[in-house]
Amino acid sequence: MNISIEPSRIVKLPYINSLKEDQLIKPKVITQNHFYSYTIKANETVYPKTFALSSNVPIIDYIGIHCFSVWIIEPRRMFLEGDHVIAQTKNRRLYAGKGKLLTSHSLILRNNDDVNCGVLDFADLHFIGRFARGISMNRQ
């Protein structure tokens, strides 16, 4: 068995550790007290405004991300079909699903079996981002 060591670095991401049902994700996550130490490989990029979100938030989850303790989210306006998307509507509901453009005004969210689960109008969205990675931690 060979063990190969890869260069990596740690970046500190703003960390939202609680999001109550009546709170909206701020367009620019700024926190002075809560950061998440995120390890990336040398060839990986952290996109601007990327943040970490604790999984203890209420979410309508079509793709099974609730099993991760921390979600790494990249705010984005454009996606590839099948990207894992996190969206928050103006009425404060949070969704996770595989994104597919339905029209120029709406997005279909699918589950892991590519079954359509919901349609979101862009006019109703407060926040949209790409689920970049889920991190499991021991919960005690």
Image: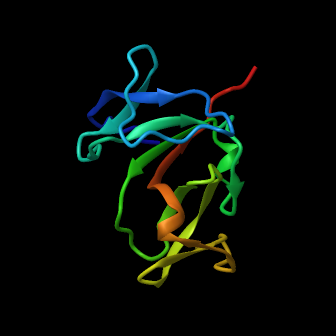
Up the image or down, 108 lies above or below 93; here it is below
Nearest the camera: 45 or 89?
A: 89
Dividing the picture into quadrants, the one containing residue 4 is: top left
Q: Residue at x 62, y 57 (%)?
A: 95
Up the image or down, 82 lies above or below 125; here it is below
Q: Residue at x 66, y 38 (%)?
A: 22
Q: Position of residue 139 (x, y in %)?
A: 72, 25
Q: Position of residue 26 (x, y in %)?
A: 44, 39
- The furthest residue to the top: 33
User: Going by the image, does 96 lie left or right of 29?
Assistant: right
Nearest the camera: 111 or 106?
A: 106
* Quadrant showing the C terminus: top right
Q: Residue at x 69, y 63 (%)?
A: 62
User: Going by the image, does 47 lie left or right of 27?
Assistant: left
Dividing the picture into quadrants, the one containing residue 61 is: bottom right
Nearest the camera: 7 or 122?
A: 122
Q: Position of residue 48 (x, y in %)?
A: 27, 43
User: Going by the image, does 85 lie left or right of 118?
Assistant: left
User: Going by the image, does 131 lie left or right of 138?
Assistant: left
Mark count: 0
